[in-house]
Image (cartoon, helix red, strand yellow):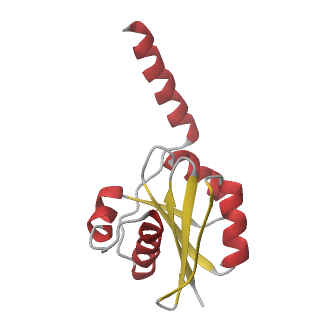
Amino acid sequence: MEQFIGLDVSMKDTFISIREGGKRIWRGKCLSDPKLIAQVVRTRAPNAERVVFETGPLSIWFYHALKLEGVPAICIDARHAKAALDMARNKTDANDADGLAHICEVGFYREVRVKNIDSMLVRTLVAARTQMIR
């Protein structure tokens, strides 16, 4: 059976929720390291169809690192996901991960195009140059 995973990513920890057949089958957290997350995905959800997380400061790096690990990662629009996640009674990181997994399972998300690493580096250099000029 297909499994759907939601990741609530922060700088230190990432909360993970795995759903299968309309029910949550596992929920936990690990350090925000794509290699560790990929290991959890391979161990807990070998039939993962999609792994969803929201746009944010780490999304470009996370997306490419997870793809290199062979994880079917999808980055979705945070504003679009917020509308669905705000309906939850208790707003916690673990519940957000579960909500993202549910959004993924239902297919109610808007995927965003993630730029490549080279574009991110050029943008970072231009921003650093602008700061130095100021």
Question: Residue farthest to the top?
Answer: 133
Q: What residue sits 51% from the left and 35% below the top?
A: 119
- Residue 38 appears at what percent x and percent y? 68, 63
- Residue 122 appears at what percent x and percent y? 51, 28
- In the displayed structure image, the side of residue 89 where residue 106 appears, left or right: right
Examine the image and state in which quarter residue 110 appears: bottom left
Depth order, front residue of 66/9 = 9
Depth order, front residue of 87/120 = 87
Examine the image and state in which quarter residue 51 appears: bottom right
Q: Quadrant of the N terminus?
A: bottom right
- In the displayed structure image, the side of residue 64 where residue 92 appears, left or right: left
On screen, residue 60 above or below 35: above
- In the displayed structure image, the side of residue 123 where residue 71 appears, left or right: right
- Residue 104 appears at what percent x and percent y? 44, 75
On screen, residue 23 above or below 5: below
Residue 68 visible in the displayed image: no
Examine the image and state in which quarter residue 37 appears: bottom right
Q: Quadrant of the C terminus?
A: top left
Q: What residue sits 40% from the left and 15% below the top?
A: 130
Q: What residue sits 46% from the left and 15% below the top?
A: 129
- Residue 45 appears at what percent x and percent y? 65, 78
On screen, residue 85 above or below 22: above
